[in-house]
Amino acid sequence: MQEKSVLEQENVADTYDGPSYIIVDKNALCDIFKYTLCGICNQSTLKLEFGHKYGFSHQLKLVCKTCSEQKMECFTSPRLEKKSNTSAPFDVNVHAVQAFLAISGGQASVEEFCMFLNMPLMSSKTFNEIKCYINSVYSLASQTVLNYVHNSVQNAYSKLNQNGSNTVTDIAVSFDGTRLTEDTHPKSVLAV
Ligand SMILES: [Zn+2]
């Protein structure tokens, strides 16, 4: 029986239209256009050219060698939203760096991965820039969660206070090593 992908198992494959990736041999990619005719000169001389690369995102250009018409130009990955202090990273680089960090591999593991697949290396500069981007996204997300939990707990206890059962004067909410505390002299602490 053929194994199903994680997306298929979760039954979201049909509705997910975000980026997803496959590893493709560049020759196979170029072969797609070998017998495709150019719409201008009607010759089968379309050629896929590889331009700039940023980590695992490569610029692709489809040009006709007979009439020099450039058919299209794109990158192999979309860009993500720019955060403060970082440039807009490519989606594929963020996911790749996340993956290598998750399996406790650093830049050295990325290099080994690339070498085994005969892929151009992701530079340590790109790797570290993406790491900073991921950290800023995590920090923003954890702050948002903290603020939400903080407000929810505060509202719950302010209702208790109104009912005359004021036994809690301080609320601390900690998340992933971050701790926020209300009041300077806590009498009791609630960790969420
Ligand atoms: Zn042409």
Image (cartoon, rainbow, N blue to C red):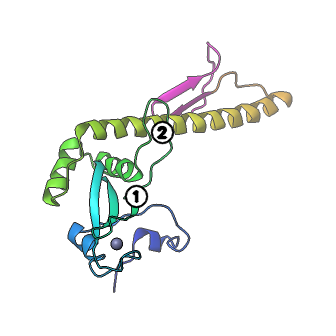
Depth check: 105 or 125 in front? 125
Asked whether 74 falls inside the magenta stretch, the response is no
Badge 1 amino acid: Cys
- Label annotation for residue 74: 1
**Number of numbered discs visible in the structure rendering:** 2
Badge 2 amino acid: Val
Quadrant observed for ligand 1 in the rendered image: bottom left
The magenta stretch spans which residues? Answer: 172-192
Can you say which quadrant of the picture contains the C terminus?
Answer: top right
Secondary structure, magenta segment, majority class: loop
Q: Is mark 2 within 8 Å of ligand 1?
A: no
Circle 2: is it few (<14), some (14-19), or many (20+) Cα within 10 Å? few
The location of residue 110, given as percent across then percent down, is: 22, 49
Image quadrant in which you'd find residue 5: bottom left
Q: Are marks 2 and 1 in contact (CB under 8 Å)?
A: no
| Structural distance between the alpha carbons of marks 2 and 1 | 26 Å
Relative to 7, is 168 on the left or the right? Answer: right
The residue under label 2 is 137
SS at badge 1: strand
Residue 192 visible, this angle: no
Circle 1: is it few (<14), some (14-19), or many (20+) Cα within 10 Å? few
Residue 52 visible, this angle: yes
